[in-house]
Image (spheres, coloured by chain):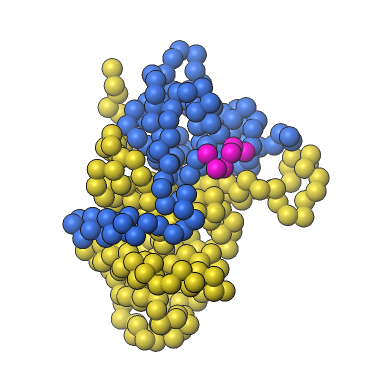
Amino acid sequence: MHSTTSDQRTPLRTTAADALKIVVVGGFGVGKTTLVGSVSEIRPLSTEEVMTQASVGIDDASRVRTKTTTTVAFDFGRITLNTSMVLYLFGAPGQQRFWFVWDQLFAGSLGAVVLVDARRLEDSWYSIDRLEHHRTPFVVAVNRFTDGPSLEAVREALALSPEVPLIDCDARERSSGKHVLITLMEHLTRTHDQSPAQESMP
Amino acid sequence: MTRRAIDQEDPDRLYTVTGGRTSADEKTFDSVSLIVSECAPTPGMQSEHIRILRMAQRPTAVVEISAELRLPVSVVKILLRDLLDTGRITVRHPSVAAQAGRPDPEILRQVLVALHNL
């Protein structure tokens, strides 16, 4: 009765009850999907979201052909953490329009990984700015394609505050992807231990 | 409410599956809310509803349903709203998303332990 055709889905445990999110942000071709796939228990899936708000500046809603939506594609994988907890890892392009759907998709994320290509650091400036604006804790991981600038030079070029962890990674390697996630979680634990007054700082 | 397609690329299909509705209650479903079927599909149900009920025999996240049905996340939320209102599904909400970005330290610790054990 059940077809065995294209349904390759791996279902979650029946006890799965609490899903968590981490977002991997980075420019095109930097290796977001590779990083997600290296640690995910499923092959990364892709889908899309549309911006549901009416566009600013358009007051004639009856003009059906007016372009009032923004569609953004993203992909994701997942890791079953224990009997009840599941971690979803989202790969999100850092370009401007993506941030319109950030709250729709990623509100309540534990934190973010900014994946950077050391040869194109400027691709990350906008994402870092937006994460700071959203007060989403993040770490920065440099996906090493070739030898490039030192981490110190990257930190300076990105104007990262000293407390933001900055590490090298190889997005293809499971152990490296795991290390990136652990670095983020350790950073979150430290941030959490700090005074809640930190939260109200601009 | 004005009726307009929510995706310019394939408006007809999206219009049809949602009956022309363009927004669901965003608060009801998070992108990673886990959906669980509470009944089997019945004849005459909308095909997307049938597929969701089959997928969610085991807990299934909203984004996974979106990927499988090839429909935007917000469209899936509208379909889920129908199923929730008629008692055909239940929802397991993410605990952290409800806490406005201040996760319980115990949750952080459990995630860290689990990642170390991967």
Q: Is residue B25 part of the magenta span, yes or no? A: yes
Magenta highlight range? B23-28
- Left or right of A77 in this view: B70: right
Question: Which residue is depicted at the point 30% across and 23% down?
Answer: A3
* Vertical order, B31 against B83 (above or below): below
Q: In this view, which residue lies farthest toward the top?
A: B43
Q: Residue at x 29, y 21 (%)?
A: A2
Left or right: B97 with respect to A51? Answer: left
Give coordinates of residue A29: x percent, y percent: 41, 64
The front one of A118 and A59 is A59
Please state the horizontal and vertical placement of residue A15, each as a whole percent of the image. 28, 37
Q: Residue at x 46, y 53 (%)?
A: B99
Q: Is residue A185 magenta?
A: no
Compared across the picture, whether A57 is left or right of A32 comes to right
Q: In which quadrant of the rendered image does the N terminus of chain B lie?
A: top right
**Label tally:** 0
Chain letter, colour blue = B
In front: A200, or A181? A200
User: From where the camera sits, is residue A128 visible?
Assistant: no
Q: Main secondary structure of the magenta part?
A: loop
Front residue of B118 and B103: B103
**Residue A152 visible in the snapshot:** yes
